[in-house]
Image (cartoon, coloured by chain):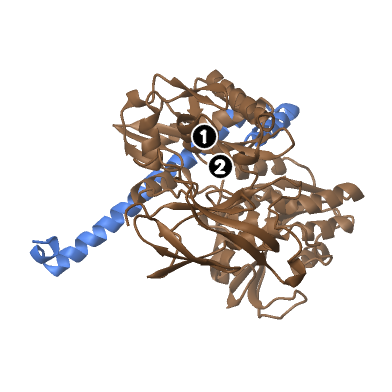
Chain colours: A brown, B blue
Amino acid sequence: MAGRAARVLAVDEAEVKLLVTGRDRAVDALFDGRRIWSFWVRRDTTGRLVRRVSWPEVMRPHLRGTSTVTLREHVSDRVLWEGDLTFGDAADRGRRIEFVNKMGLEISLDKANRFSPTFSVRTQADLDPLLDAMDAVLDTLNGEGVAAFPAYGTLLGAVREGQFLGHDSDADLGYVSRFSDPVDVVRESFRLQRAVAAAGMETYRYSGAAFRVRVEEGDGIPRGLDVFGGFLDTGRLYLMGEVGTDYEPGWIHPLGTCELAGRTFPAPARPEKLLEAMYGPSWRVPDPAYQFETSERTKTQLNQWFRGSAYHRREWEREWSVARSRPLPRKGSDLARLAARREDPATHLIDVGAGRGSDALWWARRGRRATAYDFAAVGLRRAARHAGSKQLPLEVRPLNLTEWRSVLSEGARVAREPGPRALVARHVVDATDEFGRQSLGRFASMTLRGGGRLYLEFWTGGGEPDPAHLLRPLTVERVRRLVTDHGGTIQSVRELDPGAGNDARSFAVGRLVAQWG
Amino acid sequence: MGLRSRLPGGRVHELTQRVERLEADLAEVRRHNLRLAELADLVQELLLPMADQDRERIDRAIEKFQDSI
């Protein structure tokens, strides 16, 4: 049976059934001849003799209609199964299944099972802006004394195929710092982001050692160019976000070159050594469903040195991204109404952790000066657009409670503004971590030092909040202590049962009002 | 022969606790890297303009700083 990976027994609307012999290997699923998804016949399936794998949930919205489905071994191109399949009900029979995004561009799943226009469907003209951006970012980093090179999938594609990997959807750059202390590596990454932003590019920080540059391709497709920092220390290389391994400095510097999509880019002196550190010894074998097997030791080190400044941000971004087409609630929450009632009409009302911004918008509609803060910008876009079109007094600003630079700079900015203000934070202390809670206390203490109130509402443990997986219950006593530790004087504390008040709420909350100054 | 069979039960428990404490201490020390870098960056970028007391310069410095984080 050597060389035989799998026999496909059946393919239907729900799943693929296989008999697997021999070693594990990647299989591509093609719809009308185009690769949409890839899976490993053992790793990604369940069952003993007959192994099964369901179509990924993210594919479901697209699976209505008919298509010629092909299952093909990724490396050998051997076809394991092919046939016409209809998904959905009879009414869908006449249409072909299409995997296209809102802009009408063909999309497929990358290794993280996210849909995007993977490089396989891009032309050279589409890719030129990304290649130009790579050049521009490399130049900017060079200007800062940092010699970067294509990394991860981009280096793999360049070295193995001279091209972007067909199933990949973003581009990566990496560098090995001249510093060997994580604190200096982080400071350097901050400096590099500043230089890239000053060159007019839009950036987004993931962690203390990695940020993303937003690039638009030829036809407006947004593409991420990630810049990963690394360092060498006593014979080990650490590169954000997956590498921690014994390493020779001479395998990186002096840099050589590699070819990518017809252009020459810098490369580590021994690119194969870095590729092995990233993808293991089998990096030469193509694998569109690759999953990093980073050791626990490396994960722990990278987490503790560099991560922790974006607690649950990705989850909130996903939450608001899914909700973005839903209309905003017209009604303000009980807490928003309480603050509007209690505060003088001239008071600047500030919503910290505003989510989609419906409370701040509700204030602005009533002529109140309002600011909505959140660290997941996608949630606030609709409210900002609405306020902009109606010329409402709403300002939308980023604030990340798990990043000191954000809290302290914004705290300093607000503290210098004249006039009375009040802070409202609904489901913030129960959504962030301890660092974020202390930051909220600090932000309140900075911005309300001249006098002003803080209104808090949080889940206390009863019932089931929404979204339950992103909230952690807190006792009233713990929140009371947080506030007094930062100099607030408690004015009122209440615990409300599920159903109490006007909010349609099926869980218990604590409500606390505190005064500074 | 395993460590457990060579050490009395109380000693194994004590060593396990010590390893857990050391891991927690190490995590704490490692986490200071990011926070120290943040504070150093903040001081470097904002302290001088703030000390200058020039309102416009302070506003510009904060705005520029926030555009790049």
For label 2, the residue is A168
Report the chain holding disc 1: A
Q: Tell me the SS state at disc 2.
A: loop
Q: Nearer the viewer, residue A371 or A168?
A: A168
Horizontal side of A514 relative to A259 (left or right) equals: right
Q: Quadrant of residue A143?
A: top right
Q: Is residue A294 above or below residue A95?
A: above
For label 1, the residue is A154
Q: Crowdedness of circle 1 by 10 Å Cα count: few (<14), some, many (20+)?
A: many
Image location (x, y in percent) of residue A466: 65, 69
Q: Nearer the viewer, residue A75 or A119?
A: A75
Q: Is residue A23 above or below residue A134?
A: below
Q: Quadrant of residue A286?
A: top left
Image location (x, y in percent) of residue A369: 84, 51
| Residue lying furthest right | A390
Who comes first in sequence, dot 2 or dot 1? 1
Q: Residue at x 58, y 31 (%)?
A: A193
Quarter of the picture containing the N terminus of chain A is bottom left
Q: Crowdedness of circle 2 by 10 Å Cα count: few (<14), some, many (20+)?
A: many
Q: Is residue A404 above or below residue A90?
A: above
Horizontal side of A47 relative to A245 (left or right) equals: right
Q: Amino acid at mark 2?
A: Asp
Discs 2, 1 touching: Cβ within 8 Å = yes
On the same chain: label 2 and label 1? yes
